[in-house]
Image (cartoon, rainbow, N blue to C red):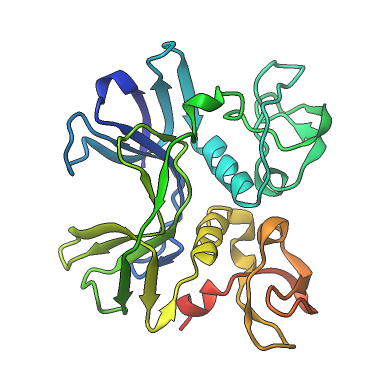
């Protein structure tokens, strides 16, 4: 992963898109747990991207006011995880160092009043229970206000479909999207040939892998779960002992290991001996 990028919307009139970068939810190309800030940028209308890279941080100049916005890997990762579980982060400043604070890990999915400043490492209290994120103070009109559209394409593959393997991600909305076309919602895949050349880079409404339909929400959760090193060894794939269906933990429990689980299908509660997080997509990975 590269270090950082300075970029201005004015220099790329055909559009810039910025996402949080997460490990693939499903891959046949080995372990890749990189996170960061992923950028697409085009100077002219074309399928070619002048920039298609992941960075530790991005310094973005928005033309309307020339302010520079810093987007760090830590902040955008936490922001996307909060959004996935339905928490809306707010901009809160540490009263000691006056810096905007970002809650990470479990604290990015659980509102709370006591915060450990991500800059000066001192505790402070917010007026209300909340999740803090340094990106939340940015003017809302600049971020995540773009159009999205559902894709209508499907793809049926197995482990041999791409000779060089593939990576699959669940969709999450771009933090910034200045392209003319709408952002596509679905499951994103990169496919490679024997030489490592990318031969597919597309988004589908449905991807079937080895006769199993990949659940979009499972893919969203798993790629973000894999970005959290403290829970990597806690991700499992559980079957409900009552209905026999594979269970996936959602919301807060999708990022905090626990013993008591509530089946998403039959609503019955069941227990595990050790604290784990269940994601049914693990059953596909472990086939």
Residue at the spot 71% in from the left edge and 37% down from the top edge: 131
Left-right relation of 47 to 220: left
Residue at the spot 33% in from the left edge and 32% down from the top edge: 16
- Dividing the picture into quarters, in which one does residue 78 lie? top right
On the image, the x and y values in percent for residue 45 come to 18, 35
Left-right relation of 240 to 33: right
Residue 166's place in the image compared with 80, above or below, is below
- The number of discs equals 0
Residue 263's place in the image compared with 191, above or below, is below
Residue 7's place in the image compared with 208, above or below, is above
- Dividing the picture into quarters, in which one does residue 123 lie? top right
Residue at the spot 26% in from the left edge and 26% down from the top edge: 12
Determine the residue located farthest toward the top in the rendered image.
65
Left-right relation of 9 to 262: left
On the image, the x and y values in percent for residue 61 come to 39, 18
On the image, the x and y values in percent for residue 5 come to 35, 28
Left-right relation of 136 to 192: right
Residue nearest the viewer, comparing 33 with 45? 45
Residue nearest the viewer, comparing 35 with 233? 35
Residue at the spot 80% in from the left edge and 39% down from the top edge: 112
On the image, the x and y values in percent for residue 251 come to 68, 57
Residue 168's place in the image compared with 228, above or below, is below
Q: In which quarter of the image is the N terminus?
A: top left
Residue nearest the viewer, comparing 37 with 116? 37
């Amino acid at each position: 992963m590269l270090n950082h990028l300075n970029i201005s919307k004015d220099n790329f009139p055909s559009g810039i898109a910025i996402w949080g970068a997460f490990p693939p939810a499903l891959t046949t190309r080995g372990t890749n747990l990189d996170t960061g800030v992923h950028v697409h940028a085009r100077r002219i209308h074309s399928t070619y991207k002048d920039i298609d890279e992941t960075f530790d941080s991005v310094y973005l100049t928005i033309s309307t006011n020339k302010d520079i916005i810093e987007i760090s890997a830590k902040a955008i990762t936490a922001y996307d995880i909060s959004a996935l579980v339905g928490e809306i982060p707010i901009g809160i400043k540490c009263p000691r160092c006056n810096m905007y604070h970002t809650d990470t890990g479990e604290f990015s999915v659980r509102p709370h009043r006591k915060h450990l400043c991500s800059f000066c490492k001192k505790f402070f209290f917010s007026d209300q229970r909340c999740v803090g994120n340094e990106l939340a103070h940015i003017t809302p009109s600049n971020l995540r206000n773009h159009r999205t559209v559902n894709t209508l394409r499907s793809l049926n593959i197995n482990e041999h479909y791409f000779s060089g393997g593939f990576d699959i991600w669940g969709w999450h909305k771009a933090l910034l999207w200045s392209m003319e076309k709408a952002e596509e919602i679905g499951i994103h895949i990169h496919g490679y040939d024997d030489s490592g050349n990318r031969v597919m880079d597309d988004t589908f409404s449905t991807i079937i892998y080895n006769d199993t339909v990949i659940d979009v929400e499972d893919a969203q959760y798993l790629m973000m779960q894999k970005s959290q090193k403290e829970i990597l060894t806690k991700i499992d794939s559980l079957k409900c002992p009552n209905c026999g269906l594979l269970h996936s933990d959602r919301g807060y429990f999708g990022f905090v290991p626990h013993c008591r689980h509530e089946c998403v299908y039959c609503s019955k509660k069941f227990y595990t001996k050790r604290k784990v997080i269940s994601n049914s997509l693990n059953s596909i990975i472990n086939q």
